[in-house]
Amino acid sequence: MSLKEEMPELKAEVESFDWWHTIDLGDGIVTPGRDNSPRKLERLRLPDDLTGKSVLDIGAWDGFFSFEAERRGASRVLAVDSYAWNGSTWGSKRGFELAREALGSNVEDSEMEVLDLSPSTIGTFDVVLFLGVLYHMRYPLLTLKKISDITRELLILETVVDLLSIRRPAMAIYPEGVLYGDISNWNGINPAGLEAMLKEVGFSRVEVVQKPDALPKRLARALYYRLKPGAPRGPIMHISRITIHAYK
Ligand SMILES: C[S@@+](CC[C@H](N)C(=O)[O-])C[C@H]1O[C@@H](n2cnc3c(N)ncnc32)[C@H](O)[C@@H]1O
């Protein structure tokens, strides 16, 4: 019997652990993810048609974006992660494996550290997704160089940006959990800094497809966080998120 035929069991299993991604498994079963993944997808401007493309999803966690790339026709999708899959602090690989089976997906997986990615360890890919990972990296320029080396056409980069009022390339660092009290958060590079770094590591064109929030929205959020008891602390007014398409 397939997982879909065992519907009540699938529903119960989906509800038995924590999810990061919100994934529609069909037949009314949607994983209760903390992340609003469909909304994030809209902002990424992932190409509608990925027919024949090889796609690498770095930091894939429950695999929402890997499965979406496969749905859009990618000929091969490889999902890579480390922390969220090894059951240490972030979570486990259970969601990815369950969703892959429920969706009847052929997405491949490999448990790997970002800095171990290279043409000799995993090869090169037409499209690389690097979503919500860069700001965790202690060595961001080295990380982007590693990613450039394995990208053939397009990198889709989504990350935290900081120092938005500074026009010169700049980077904030978050030692000791300065951002949201989370020690895994490490850097917030401003848009000019990201563009400079991406060009430095070999991308020829850099396009911002999701702009950071403008000042009034950031001010409103900072005020809301200030007034909300127990809200995480950090340089809220100066930070936002960005999505960039970087082309080789
Ligand atoms: C905020 S989550 C983002 C998950 C997903 N890409 C998304 O955008 O919804 C960060 C992910 O990056 C992974 N990650 C963080 N540092 C990593 C590293 N050095 N090597 C591999 N994966 C890493 C975590 O395990 C986690 O799955």
Image (spheres, rainbow, N blue to C red):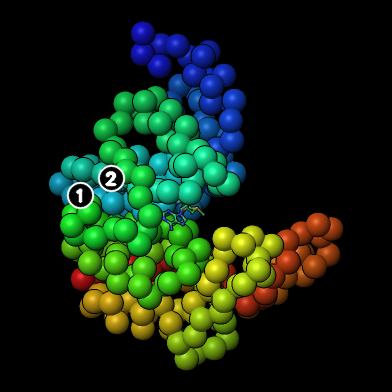
Q: Is residue 126 left or right of residue 139?
A: left
User: What is the quadrant of residue 209 in the picture?
Assistant: bottom left
Image mark for residue 71:
none
Q: Position of residue 244 (x, y in %)?
A: 38, 68
User: Is the residue indicated by label 1 positioned so its CB lies within 8 Å of ligand 1?
Assistant: no
- Between the C-alphas of marks 1 and 2, the distance is 8 Å
Closer to the chain start, of discs 1 and 2, is: 1
Pointer 1 residue: 54
Asked if the residue under mark 2 is in contact with the one under mark 1, i.e. CB atoms within 8 Å, the reply is yes
Dot 1 falls on a residue whose secondary structure is: strand
Q: Residues within 10 Å of mark 1 (few under 14, many from 20)?
A: many
In the depicted structure, whether residue 201 falls above or below residue 107:
below
Viewer-proximal residue among 20 and 218: 20
In the depicted structure, whether residue 199 falls above or below residue 115:
below
Instruction: Give the quadrant of the N terminus.
Output: top left
Pointer 2 residue: 78
The reply to whether residue 87 is visible in this rendering is: yes
Identify which amino acid the numbered label 1 is placed on.
Answer: Ser
Task: Please give the name of the residue rendered at 62% of the width and 72% of the height, measured from the top-left corner.
Answer: 175
Q: Position of residue 159 (x, y in %)?
A: 47, 65
User: What is the quadrant of residue 11 in the picture?
Assistant: top right
The reply to whether residue 212 is visible in this rendering is: no
Q: Nearer the viewer, mark 1 or mark 2?
A: 2
